[in-house]
Amino acid sequence: MNEKIVYLGSYNNSNGEYLFNKALDYVKENKGDKFYYILPNGKLLNKYRNEFIYKAGNVFDINLFTFDDVVDRLLENDFYTNVDEEMKEVLISKILDELNRESKLQYYRKISSKKGFIKILINIIGELKRSLITPSIYMERSPDTLFYREIGLIYREYERYLYENRLIDREGSFLEGLSILREDNRLFQGLDFIIIDQFFDFRPQEMGLLEEMVKTGIPIYINMPFNRTENFETLLSTLDILRDQGFKIVHIEDKEFSYFEQMANSMFSQETKTIASNPDISMIKAPNNYLEMKKIAEKIKTHINKGIELRDMAIVLTNASEYKDIMFEVFEEETIPCSLNKDINLMEIPLIKEILHILELKKNNMDKPSAINRIKSNYFKLCDNRDLIEYILRKLDFESILELKSSNKLEVFSEGKLIRDIIERIEKESESLPERANIGEYINFITQIIEKYNLEDSIINIYGITKDYDLLHRDFVALNKFKDILEKLNTLQNVLQDKVDLEKFLNLLENYLEEESITEIQGNNRGINILTPVTSRGHEFKVLFVVGLSQGKYPNLENENFFFKEENHEELKNIGVDIKNYYEKLDKESLIFTTIISACTQTLYLTYSENSTGDEKDIPSIFLDEVLRIIDGQELAEKIDIINVDMDYLLKTNIGQLTTEKDIPRYLIRKYYEGEYEKEHFHMYYEMDKTIFNEINNNILCEVERYKDEFNQYNGNIGDEHIRKDIANIHRNKVYSISYLESYGICPYYFLLNNILKVEEMERTLLDFTPLDRGIITHDILKQYYYKYKEQIKEHILGEEVFQVEETYDYIINKMKQIMGHMG
């Protein structure tokens, strides 16, 4: 029976469950290989797979796919080398060079070497192939201008290069898969039916696959739970295409709408009808993304206390790139598990950075910064006392270590011979690295370096010192990923026989590293669900947070480049490119937003940040305005619960806002400051952790002593008789400036180290801390350092015993960790 049916129903209707149960019956009968179940994204695949396993028990075959998976099956027996984005960049760069040498580029000649232009070309070629437009079709349909024709020329040469070298990119795999299906559709033989669920539109290559499925005569059931009283043009256009394919549209009888389904049905319609306000809808407005996420964390914990499990809640990140890192930071502070893996980019891992430093040293002609980076290496160690060597090199004036070696600047140092030996080792190491070579030679150099320094042993040795298993695991996983990248580059070497200079190879390697990451924290299946607007369809949650509803950021409709822009829309449509104008993009994004709203069953939070810079502030998204438009009420407060978050939120004015242990002393001290002494809570927390209140008490006592009229150790008197005499002798008959005296009054501890002991500062780039943070840390450590080693310093000044500063490093590091921990 050649059934081709589209089930068109309202949001969350029961027909999806009917089709799921149809497939489930097959799975229970061990016939999971007799159907295809096609879904739009990996999130839904995981959800459906887990439900099949939970309800059917032992499952051997479940043909749950995306359209991409179907293509992979079609090509699994074909021997192609896959081309990734980085390899595309190399190939197109090579093609542009050849076309320029042959004087075939005029319009794009001047920008053809720009990296940004090459990336746009990759995007253009990808979109053409996704639209099933081959180079010949493009050249036949495109306007006869250099603007269009030279793009076609580049596209044609790119495809020729892929064909001649048995290469295939992701977009090309669809074209190849369709070509295979048109000749032989055995892939679908033996199937009893195909279910396609949760699609409201299809990309051209997906529609091409669907056309070939239709030709098999296998029953196809498409579930589209997006029907509204007033449908979006995106959905209506898709239905028209499916009708032309011979599909029958079956309308599913509407069920009674929930409140949020009613809201989704009413939004973006021409009707002026509104819906009643709902106390379970809140709008969170915060000054920045961090406080926005902190308030969300508080609300999550509130719902946990009410008995709602994390897996029944979800966060939809409308702008994942802007919010993801902050979300992980807040969730770590709040100890909230989430479903999303926390990844770390390979470029951020010290082991990988040190490999790059070895290559950069040669590229940068062994200049001073590159040499210092090389000497500081932990994994490819050149010496033990790296900090001392670094200190000496930073203080010396030189351009490159070769210049330093030939000078006499090292002769005044007892470590001069050691530094010369290190320079010679670095020279010898760099000599084996060619300035221009084929990719295979560079890979061999890196491999030899890894073997020479026994990198795996270095990782284990560092673990022996740190006892940090997470660090050990991270480094080994990063090393394996790095070796995989070298394998990919080796594949590229088989295609590109040309020699490249070191800088170009380094850029290529960095491109690969920037695209690769490793999992730092595994996502928790029982944690709160993290979704994007695209992956939110097909789910339902009791509590839903829609995060980042700021205008200009969501919906983001400005994804144009010089080729795909509004002015070229008509010409590109005539070529056959699947490109949408502004209103078509807005229509699709509006549909997606309604699916987000319909996924909520009980409590909805709509959040955004003002992110003020100067006089400018972000304003609410037009989609947030649309929600407010359809809710009854004259004033905003009548429509929705407004939660304003300001900077004082960090100090916690309400005991119900406390979500972490660190919040408790902040709250209690604020209350104490405001004249509300909560004695019971003070005593309770003091019994839990005396450290913070003791530190505060000591600081207060210190301030009291400082402001007394007497001259004491808290306001500048060092106190020790021997030190006073020594300082007096040093300054006898000395002429000094006002600033010299003021430096003593400001901080006697710093004065002692800087002016008396002559301890010099070694400048380094500090990351992640503000100047205020660094000042607090430095001052506090210097104070404690002085008290700890006061006697040894005194003996050193008196010439009685040498003070070994190196032996105190561990104390400084431990104190730094302790203070940084208290600062959060």
Image (spheres, grey):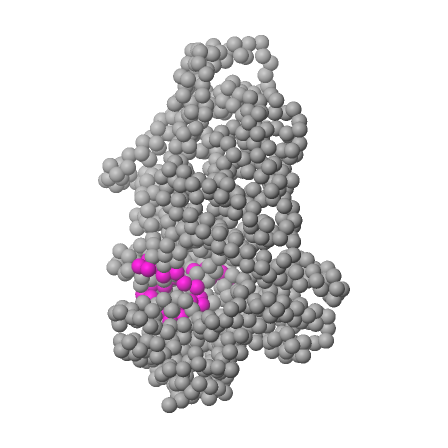
- What residue is at 51 percent from the left and 11 percent from the top? 728
> Which one is nearer the viewer's eye here, 668 or 499?
499
- Estimate the x, y position of residue 530 in percent, counting from the top left: 39, 60
Give the magenta range: 525-551
Q: Where 116 sits versus 534, above or below?
A: above
Q: Is residue 579 visible?
A: no
Q: Where 222 sits versus 753, above or below?
A: below
Question: Where on the picture, by quarter, is residue 360?
Answer: top right
> Which one is nearer the viewer's eye here, 245 or 793?
245
- What residue is at 57 percent from the left and 70 percent from the top? 127
- Estimate the x, y position of residue 264 in percent, counting from the top left: 40, 73
- Estimate the x, y position of residue 156 in percent, counting from the top left: 65, 71
- What residue is at 70 percent from the left and 76 percent from the top? 143
Residue 359 placement, left or right of 597: right
Question: Where on the picture, by quarter, is residue 100?
Answer: bottom right
Residue 813 placement, left or right of 14: right
